[in-house]
Image (tube, rainbow, N blue to C red):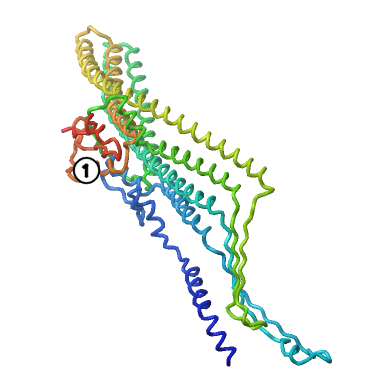
C-alpha cells in the first residue's frame, strides 16, 4: 500500500504532463478549408464547388474573375506559398524537445540467495519489477536555428510575391486570349459580309459574260477573289473555335457553349512620364519583390551556415512514470552536453563558399530583373502610344478606302474602270477594316500589358471593372458602339503621390 501511495504522489504530475503531450500530438486533424484560405484570401479567389457556369454574355471582367477563381496553376502557386508558411512554422519546432515513452518488465524464476549471504543484502534482490521510463531530448544551435526561422519567413514572402506575379500574368493572358477571340470574330463578320458582295459580283459578271458584255477574264478574277475570301473565312472561324477553347481552359470551364463575348474595357488615361512609370514598376512588380526576398533569404542562409561553427547544446532528461526497480526513490537523471564542430570545419567552409555563391547569384538575378523591368516598361509604353497613333491612322485609312471603293464601283458602271480595279479597291477596303478592328483590340491589350509591366494589373483593378459591369444593361450593340466601363488601377502601397500627381487613372469612355 505504501508503494502504491508513493507511486501516486510521485507520478501524478508526470502523468498529467504526458496526458497533455498526447492530447497535443493527437490533435493533428488538418482543416483543409482553413489551410486553403491562407492563399485564397490573398488572391481574393472563391473557387466554384460545382462546374463553372458561363453566363450568356461573358465580359472581360467576368472572364478575369472566373480565371482568378478557378485556374489550377494559380492554385498550385498558392499551395507553394502555403508550404512555405508550413516550413516557417516547422522551423519553430526545433526548440521543442523530443519525448519518448517505453515500458519494461523483468522477471526471474528459481532464484535462491547464495549460502552465507546476510538477509540485509538478499532483501534487495528483486525477482520481478516493471518500469515505465520517459525520456526527453533537446538538441539546438540557438544562433543557427533563429536564423533559419528568419530565412523561412523570407522564403514565404518570396512565394507570396511569386503567386501574385503569376496572378497578374494570368489576368493578362486571359485578356490577350479574350481580345484575340473578339478580333477573329470580327474578321469572320467582315469576311462574311465581303463574301456576300463578292458572290453577288460573280453572279453579275457571269450574266454579263453570257450577254457578251464582259470578258471571261473578269469572271475568273471575281471567282478567284471569292474563293480566296472563303479560305480566309474558314481560317478565321477555326481561329475563333481555338481561341474560345483556350479561353475556356484559362477560366476553368469545360467550354464556352454559346456565350457571347462583350468588350467592356474602353479606357482613356493620362499617361505618366517614362521615368515615373519605371519608378512605379520598381516599387510594385511582384516578381522583383520575390527576387529581393530571395536575396535576403540567401543572405540569411550565409549567416546560418557560418553559425554552424558555433557549438550546439544538447539536453537529455530522463524520468519514470512508474518505477519498480530498486532503488525506487531515484526518479530522474539529467545530462547537459555541448557539441563542438572540431573536425567539421572543412565541410562547413565548403558549405559557406556555396552559400556565398548562391547569394551572389540571387543579387545578380535581382539586378538583371530590375534592368529588364525598365526595358519592359519602355517598350510597353512605346507600344501603347504607337498603337493609339496607328488606330487613328487606320481610321482615316478606312474612310479613304471606302470612298475609293465607291468611286471604283461608279467608274466601273460608266466604263471608266475595269473589274480588276473594283476587286482591288474592295480588297483594300477589307484589309483596312480588319486592320482597324485588330488595332483597336491590340491597343487595349497594350494598355493592359502596360499595367502588367508596371505592376498595376492586380485583382483590385479587376474589381473596379466588375463594379462597373454591374451598372451595365446589356443591349444589342455593334463594335462601333462599345459599352462603357471603368478599369482604374488601385492606389499603390508606396509612392501613392506619384500616381496622384501624374494622374494615371482610367476614365470611362462615355
Query: Dividing the picture into quarters, in which one does residue 267 lie?
Result: top left
Query: Where does the N terminus fall, quadrant-wise?
Result: bottom right
Residue at x 60% of width, y 38% of height: 353
Tell me the residue that label 1 is attached to: 469
For the image, the number of numbered tags is 1
Across and down, in percent, residue 79 comes to 45, 51
The picture places residue 369, in percent across and down from the top left corner, at 44, 31
Whether residue 2 is situated above or below residue 72 in the rendered picture: below
Q: Nearer the viewer, residue 188 or 483?
A: 483
Pick out the residue farthest to the top: 416
Does the image show residue 504? Answer: yes
Indicate the position of residue 196 as horizontal and vertical percent values: 27, 26
Give the residue at the far right of this rendering: 115
The location of residue 372, given as percent across then percent down, is: 42, 28
Q: Is residue 260 visible?
A: no
Mark 1: secondary structure: helix
Q: Residue at x 20, y 15 (%)?
A: 403
In screen coordinates, is 201 left or right of 170? left
Q: Nearer the viewer, residue 90 or 350?
A: 350
Q: Quadrant of residue 269?
A: top left
Amino acid at each position: 500500500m505504501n508503494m502504491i501511495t508513493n507511486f501516486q504522489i510521485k507520478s501524478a504530475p508526470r502523468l498529467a504532463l504526458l496526458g497533455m503531450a498526447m492530447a497535443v500530438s493527437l490533435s493533428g486533424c488538418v482543416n483543409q478549408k482553413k489551410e486553403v484560405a491562407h492563399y485564397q484570401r490573398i488572391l481574393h479567389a472563391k473557387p466554384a464547388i460545382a462546374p463553372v457556369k458561363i453566363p450568356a454574355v461573358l465580359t472581360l471582367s467576368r472572364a478575369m474573375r472566373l480565371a482568378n477563381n478557378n485556374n489550377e496553376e494559380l492554385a498550385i502557386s498558392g499551395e507553394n506559398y502555403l508550404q512555405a508558411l508550413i516550413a516557417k512554422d516547422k522551423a519553430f519546432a526545433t526548440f521543442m524537445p523530443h519525448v519518448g515513452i517505453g515500458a519494461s518488465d523483468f522477471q526471474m524464476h528459481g532464484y535462491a540467495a547464495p549460502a552465507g549471504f546476510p538477509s540485509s543484502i538478499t532483501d534487495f534482490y528483486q525477482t520481478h519489477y516493471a518500469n515505465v521510463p520517459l525520456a526527453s531530448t533537446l538538441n539546438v544551435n540557438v544562433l543557427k536555428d533563429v536564423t533559419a526561422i528568419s530565412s523561412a519567413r523570407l522564403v514565404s514572402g518570396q512565394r507570396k510575391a511569386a503567386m501574385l506575379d503569376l496572378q497578374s500574368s494570368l489576368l493578362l493572358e486571359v485578356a490577350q486570349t479574350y481580345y484575340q477571340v473578339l478580333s477573329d470574330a470580327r474578321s469572320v463578320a467582315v469576311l462574311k459580309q465581303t463574301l456576300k458582295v463578292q458572290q453577288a459580283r460573280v453572279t453579275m459578271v457571269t450574266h454579263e459574260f453570257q450577254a457578251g458584255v464582259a470578258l471571261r477574264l473578269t469572271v475568273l478574277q471575281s471567282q478567284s477573289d471569292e474563293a480566296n475570301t472563303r479560305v480566309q473565312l474558314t481560317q478565321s472561324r477555326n481561329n475563333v473555335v481555338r481561341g474560345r477553347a483556350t479561353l475556356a481552359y484559362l477560366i476553368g470551364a469545360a467550354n464556352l457553349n454559346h456565350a457571347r463575348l462583350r468588350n467592356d474595357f474602353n479606357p482613356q488615361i493620362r499617361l505618366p512620364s517614362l521615368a515615373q512609370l519605371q519608378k512605379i514598376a520598381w516599387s510594385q512588380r511582384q516578381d522583383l519583390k520575390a527576387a529581393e526576398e530571395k536575396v535576403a533569404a540567401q543572405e540569411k542562409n550565409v549567416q546560418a551556415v557560418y553559425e554552424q561553427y558555433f557549438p550546439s547544446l544538447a539536453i537529455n532528461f530522463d524520468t519514470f512514470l512508474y518505477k519498480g526497480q530498486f532503488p525506487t526513490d531515484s526518479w530522474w537523471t539529467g545530462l547537459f552536453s555541448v557539441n563542438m564542430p572540431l573536425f567539421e570545419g572543412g565541410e562547413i567552409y565548403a558549405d559557406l563558399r556555396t552559400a556565398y555563391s548562391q547569394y551572389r547569384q540571387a543579387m545578380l538575378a535581382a539586378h538583371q530583373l530590375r534592368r529588364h523591368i525598365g526595358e519592359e516598361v519602355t517598350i510597353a509604353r512605346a507600344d501603347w502610344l504607337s498603337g493609339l497613333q496607328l488606330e487613328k491612322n487606320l481610321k482615316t485609312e478606312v474612310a479613304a478606302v471606302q470612298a475609293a471603293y465607291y468611286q471604283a464601283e461608279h467608274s466601273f458602271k460608266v466604263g471608266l474602270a475595269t473589274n480588276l480595279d473594283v476587286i482591288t479597291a474592295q480588297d483594300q477596303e477589307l484589309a483596312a477594316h480588319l486592320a482597324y478592328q485588330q488595332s483597336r483590340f491590340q491597343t487595349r491589350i497594350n494598355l493592359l500589358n502596360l499595367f502588367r509591366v508596371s505592376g498595376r494589373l492586380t485583382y483590385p483593378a479587376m474589381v473596379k471593372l466588375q463594379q462597373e459591369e454591374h451598372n451595365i444593361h446589356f443591349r444589342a450593340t455593334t463594335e462601333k458602339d462599345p459599352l462603357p466601363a471603368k478599369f482604374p488601377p488601385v492606389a499603390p502601397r508606396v509612392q501613392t503621390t506619384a500616381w496622384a500627381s501624374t494622374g494615371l487613372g482610367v476614365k470611362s469612355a462615355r
